[in-house]
Image (cartoon, rainbow, N blue to C red):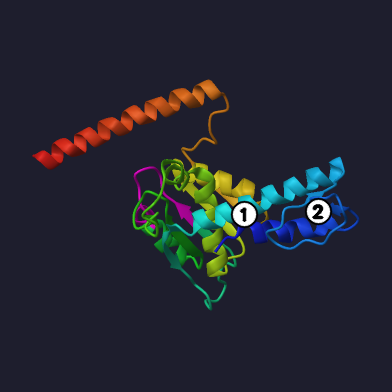
């Protein structure tokens, strides 16, 4: 239940002290939520206020978007086993893959006394995206499948499972997610193994060309699926 007026007032509060608030007749006045008022701020305080507002909005948006991503996952724990590894291996599949791709590796890790967490990335396997809202716009739909959101969804899952330190292992797309996760949450990542993966293209023109190529490939896949369903 996000109330922009109430939330903004809570953020503005710390910046009010020491400044003059005027009513419509330019007289000193008290104010309450919903009132229209003028606050005289220095440039530095104005910058700080807008930064705080921006950060609050970003947090709210991230929380809302994450609530619409329910990751599919399998956690094999050796808790209680003698000599168990205190860290967890997080195994991330590639594009068009699924968490079952890592089952044999997870089994071997378990035999070696290591915990493992296998995750279905958004758009794959049993992960559900956007199933809790029927009114997603084009921007929201695309944002749910972005790399940053996948990274934060995995980090949130680690928090929910109480996993503090991890070793990241990712193949292809999973490797890129692993590298991004290691960069964003370096404090909990002991090591990262990225297989057949690249951190991404730097040049805007290269990214645009790759996006066009990926779209054309997706169209071919969709067309092939349609032909198969007809047959």
Report the magenta residues as a range.
Answer: 90-102
Q: Residue at x 53, y 78 (%)?
A: 80
Q: Residue at x 85, y 46 (%)?
A: 41
Residue 133: x and y in percent read 39, 57
Q: Nearer the viewer, residue 197 or 119?
A: 119
* Residue at image mark 1: 59
Can the viewer see residue 208 in this picture?
A: yes
Residue 159: x and y in percent read 57, 65
Q: Residue at x 35, y 47 (%)?
A: 97
Mark 2 or mark 1, which has the lower sequence index?
A: 2
Is residue 114 highlighted in magenta?
no
Residue 155: x and y in percent read 56, 57
Q: Is residue 13 left or right of residue 130?
A: right
Dot 1: within a 10 Å radius of its alpha carbon, few (fewer than 14), some, or many (20 or more) residues? few
Q: Nearer the viewer, residue 94 or 78?
A: 94
Residue 201 quadrant: top right
Judged from the image, the secondary structure of the residue bearing numbered disc 1 is helix
* Residue at image mark 2: 23
Q: Nearer the viewer, residue 69 or 113?
A: 69
Q: Please, which residue is most extreme toward the bottom here? A: 80
């Amino acid at each position: 239940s996000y109330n922009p007026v109430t939330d903004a007032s809570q953020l503005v509060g710390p910046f009010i002290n020491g400044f003059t608030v005027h009513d419509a007749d330019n007289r000193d006045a008290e104010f309450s939520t919903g009132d229209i008022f003028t606050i005289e701020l220095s440039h530095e305080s104005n910058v700080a206020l807008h930064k705080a507002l921006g950060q609050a909005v970003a947090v709210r948006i991230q929380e809302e978007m994450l609530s619409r991503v329910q990751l599919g996952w399998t956690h094999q724990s050796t808790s209680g086993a003698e000599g168990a590894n205190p860290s967890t291996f997080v195994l991330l599949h590639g594009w068009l893959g699924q968490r079952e791709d890592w089952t044999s590796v997870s089994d071997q890790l378990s035999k070696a006394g290591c915990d493992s967490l296998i995750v279905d990335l958004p758009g794959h396997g049993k992960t559900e995206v956007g199933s809790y809202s029927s009114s997603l716009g084009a921007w929201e739909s695309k944002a749910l499948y972005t790399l940053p959101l996948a990274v934060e969804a995995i980090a949130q899952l680690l928090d929910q499972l109480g996993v503090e330190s991890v070793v990241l292992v990712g193949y292809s797309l999973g490797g890129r997610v692993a590298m991004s996760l290691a960069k964003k949450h370096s404090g909990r990542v002991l090591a990262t193994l990225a297989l057949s993966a690249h951190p991404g293209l730097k040049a805007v023109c290269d990214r645009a060309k790759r996006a066009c190529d990926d779209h054309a490939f997706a169209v071919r896949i969709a067309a092939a699926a349609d032909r198969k369903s007809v047959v």
